[in-house]
Amino acid sequence: MGKERKKGVTGIASNYVTRTKAVRKLQISLKDFRRLCILKGIYPRAPKKVNSGKNKTYYHVKDIQFLQYEPVLDKFRKIKTFIKKHKRLLARGETYDAKIFAKKRPTVVLDHLVKERYPQFTDALRDMDDPLSMLYLFAILPSRLTVGHTPERVQLCVRMVREWETIISRMHALDKVFVSIKGIYYQATVQGQPIVWLAPHQFKQHLPDDVDYRVMLTFLHFYETVATFVNYKLYHDEGLHYPPRLDEQKDASRYGIGALEVKTLQEKARESAAEYSTNKNKMDEDEEEDEEEEDEEEEEEEQKKQKSQKVLQQEVAAVVSLLGKKRPREEETETAETEDDTTQIDDFSVLDPSAPVPSLGELPNQFFRGLKFLLGREVPCDSLEFVILCGSGTVVREALLDNPNEIDNSITHQICDRPTVRKRVLTREYVQPQWIYDSFNCKMCLPVEPYKPGAKPPPHLSPFVDDESEGYMPKQKDVLDQWMSKAKKPKAKAVVDPVVSAELDQEEEEENKAKQAEALESKYHRELAQERKGVGYSEGKGSDEEDDEDEEDDEEDEEEEEEEEEKETAAEMKKRLKAEKRKEMAVGMMTQKKAKLYAKMQYGINKKKDKNTKLLNKRKALEKDTKKSKRSSKRLKKKARTTA
């Protein structure tokens, strides 16, 4: 007989370890273990077989072995010892030494983790959804939520968000925008990778008590390093210097994205060269002063020597004359060498100012080009500015104008969210903020009339939903498609040949003539019906009778539609019953596994159908209510006319 094997040594269960055993093996606290797992991207597992009970958290053995040799783990241990020493100094009352010692706190650097988790740049772009959403969230939240959440951390998040929006607007990579109750959803395509993130509305946020903000800060620490890597790569790929300089005065006056001063790599190289030349000139001046002082000292020494050595004056004079003849050549060679060195250092022929700046690629979103927008104080300026810049437009904020009463004729659109505008400028179009988002999603400037201030805007549709696959087409989608087709028609006409265009004009004229003939026939039949009723031509010409006839026609049309929906021919009923029987037979012939899968599929399809039918019924009810309200308003007008 062989030796008895211990339980949990071999097999599937031996590949997993409980959390308590993992913490003991690494010799760290539970808080540090959680941080380490978040930073390394290690998550719990759900094994099929376990040894220590089902109600415990398990990790893979290889993951724990992987954590043993992590440099961040060593940093955590050093921080722990640092805290102990710092507390000891404070307990002794040595506050001055404690302040000096606090500056030596070890810092955790996560650069190697980013390179380890994202070996390629596309991998980092694919995982940018969560980092951006977290940065946008902490840019709005107040500081001091937990230990380590300082105001400087919040300002860093705000700056990184602006840097991201700046490079996306420069690349014109934004594709979709949707304003929801949760916030504003954005989608950008960077190097073929779609990135979707959520930016919360700039309101006072409700902070729940059941959220562990320490865990969120750990994620934020890692996401900050990922975002810096990604921003650096994108800026340098576009030929821009990173990080851009932040103008503190503009930032204090809330310029938004405009507070960042973005410069190309060539401009930054020229600035650094200019700084180097100024510093070099200063160094040369200091060296010249030192040389002058040395020369004066040498002259004094020579005078002393001349007094002490009167006998050898002639020989010394001869030697000095010989040296004086050779020195100019040596000085010329030295100056030539120094000039060559300076030319090698200061030669920036590669960075010629006339050299072309690296192109930013194709600019697909140019439908706001040539338009200037004035953003009101009451609208979300940061979001609108980002979207307009991605559409190649220019932005001016009302809060930053020196003289708001001064009229600027270059402004084409003013975005306001007020019911009325007191002082209107005739050269401007006044629209609500929704016009910007809908126009960006349609990739064109939509008509302005439905979005005027005080008017109820049309429904804001989500560009993230595929209406055809969902099975329900909103009415506003048809309206948007009509507007887009009208905008594309002139471009198609310009390509048509003159012969073909003449034929098209003839066809349009014939269609118009046919429509006019139909209108005359309908008018003739209407007059005949009025004569049969005994109504004269002059009486029947009034608008009241026409309104009554229109109402009757509408009611008749509605009744006919309802009857057509309710009626179903016998042939259609037979066809439907046959199809149902065939389906039942096919389902009966399936295996049990396939039948369950089919039932799940049908459940999802039926659920989608029920949702669509509810939306259709709701839409019909709303249309009926609008028609009834129109009829009641017409009747009231008619009564008012009769009484008058």
Image (cartoon, rainbow, N blue to C red):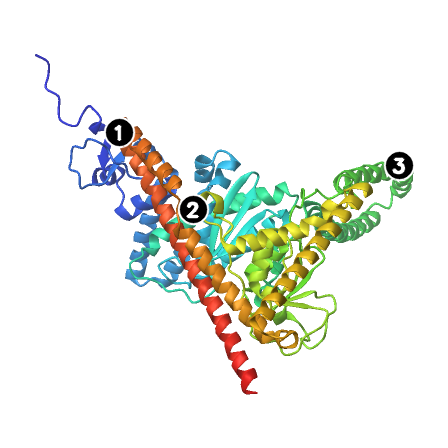
Q: Closer to us: mark 3 or mark 2?
A: 2
Q: Is residue 539 above or below residue 166?
A: below
- Residue picked out by circle 3: 329
- Residue picked out by circle 2: 222
Give how far across and how far down residue 459 sits, in percent: 51, 60
Element marked by disc 3: helix
- Residue picked out by circle 1: 588
Instruction: State the separation of the CA atoms marked 2 and 1.
Output: 55 Å
Q: Looking at this view, is 612 or 213 the one in front?
A: 612
Mark 1 nearby-residue class (10 Å; few <14, some 14–19, many ≥20): few
Q: How many marks?
A: 3
Q: Looking at this view, is 36 or 323 the one in front?
A: 36
Give how far across and how far down residue 614 sits, in percent: 38, 54
The type of residue carrying mark 1 is Gly
The N terminus appears in which quarter of the rendering? top left
Seen at 55% across and 62% down, the residue is 434
Q: Residue furthest top?
A: 1
Report whether 70 appears left or right of 410: left
Element marked by disc 2: helix
Element marked by disc 1: helix
